[in-house]
Image (cartoon, helix red, strand yellow):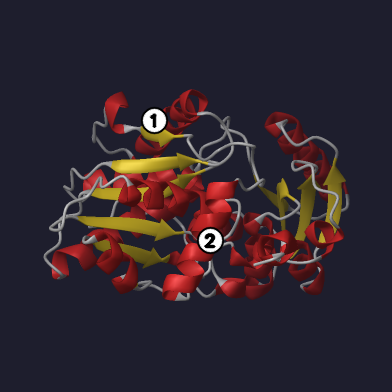
Amino acid sequence: MSLTENFPRVELSHRPTPLERLQNVGAEFDTHVWIKRDDCTGLALGGNKSRQLEFYIGQALEQGADTLLTTGAVQSNHVRMTVAAARKVGLEVEVQLEHRVERDQPEYHQSGNPYLVKLMGAKIHYYPEGEDEEGADLALERRAAELAAEGRKAYVIPLSNAHTPYGALGYVDGAEELAAQLQELDIEPARFIVPSGSASTHTGFLLGVRASGCKTPVHGVCVRRDAVSQKQRVATKLRAVIDVIGCNIEIGDDEILCDDSMLAPGYGLPNEATVAAIKYLARREGILLDPTYSGKTFAVLLAMLQQGRFGKNDHVVFLHTGGTVSLFAYPELVDGA
């Protein structure tokens, strides 16, 4: 019995997503490296957000909403996939783009995710701050009130930690799916490597892994805030998800692992090691990573491999959360390649 089966949900993802061995990477470092391909979930070029949106939109439809509202950075994968999900289930959609990343390049503002948001016809609003989650959520609530005055019913998908993170249920389910794949292969990993941004993926994944009886460490890679702040965020979300599910699983603070070694210079700004990791996996395996989430996460894994952290009998699993659409917003990655 899945922990998520009693929650309203719509089908948006191609599931199960593949679990693939990175043969060339593993051979180079004399270990076993696996990749969970959640860049292949299918909705509008894929990514982890479709698993999360299944539960938010399930609620929206149950409540009779006719419009979705959400917020995110200019190159937000969540925003792009929310628009796609709305179109798939026949809802109107309005999105709010936040000024979160200091980039003046026209490609950042015109290609990748914002290009697709415009292509799918979402109404776009702009929010001038990038580090004001509560303010961004309040702006959505004000817009929802305006729509209510027009006789419409909006469902807000919020950003801040002040709300129950129903999206995390998608990765409780996703971790259960991965655990079944690993069990079929008779593999007990030494470590899972996952991105940790809004923390819904990290939180749900950790809970789902433990619910499946697996004690493997879940290594969260910080992409937006420092490790201390991120650990607090995951802990808060974890308590909220456990409460909403009503389960009695106990996860200690020492099990919440947050690594900010690749965070600098900040959210959406790749460092030299991240650029190298993106090029490395593209050229070794033909797999594309993004500069904000999966690139920084794989950069941490690559550093571990280079440091000899895993033995020849070890298995390590990297969760690829997608986001490769945003590669087109960073043309400098291949300047002089």
Identify the residue at image location x=39%, y=47%: 303
Q: Position of residue 228 (x, y in %)?
A: 47, 23
Q: Residues within 10 Å of mark 1 (few under 14, many from 20)?
A: some
Left or right, 190 with reference to 278: left
Identify the residue at image location x=86%, y=59%: 106
SS at circle 1:
helix
Left or right, 6 with reference to 312: right
Q: Position of residue 220 (x, y in %)?
A: 40, 41
Q: Is residue 280 above or below residue 142?
A: below
Mark 1–mark 2 Cα distance, whole angstroms, equals: 34 Å
Q: Quadrant of the N terminus?
A: bottom left
Q: Quadrant of the C terminus?
A: bottom right
Task: Judge by depth and name the residue closer to the eye, 299 or 168.
Answer: 299
Identify the residue at image location x=51%, y=40%: 262
Left or right, 203 with reference to 326: left
Read off the residue under disc 2: 278
User: What amino acid does circle 2 point to?
Assistant: Ile
User: What amino acid does circle 1 point to?
Assistant: Arg
Left or right, 63 with reference to 296: right
Q: Please give the label number shown on residue 239.
A: 1
Task: Judge by depth and name the residue closer to the eye, 126 or 5.
Answer: 126
Hey, which residue is sitting farthest front in the picture? 336
Task: Judge by depth and name the residue closer to the eye, 271 or 232.
Answer: 271
Task: Judge by depth and name the residue closer to the eye, 238 or 316.
Answer: 316
Q: In the rendered structure, which disc, 1 or 2, sits on the residue that comes first in sequence?
A: 1
Residue 221 seen from this side: yes
Q: Residues within 10 Å of mark 2 (few under 14, many from 20)?
A: many
Q: Position of residue 241 (x, y in %)?
A: 40, 38
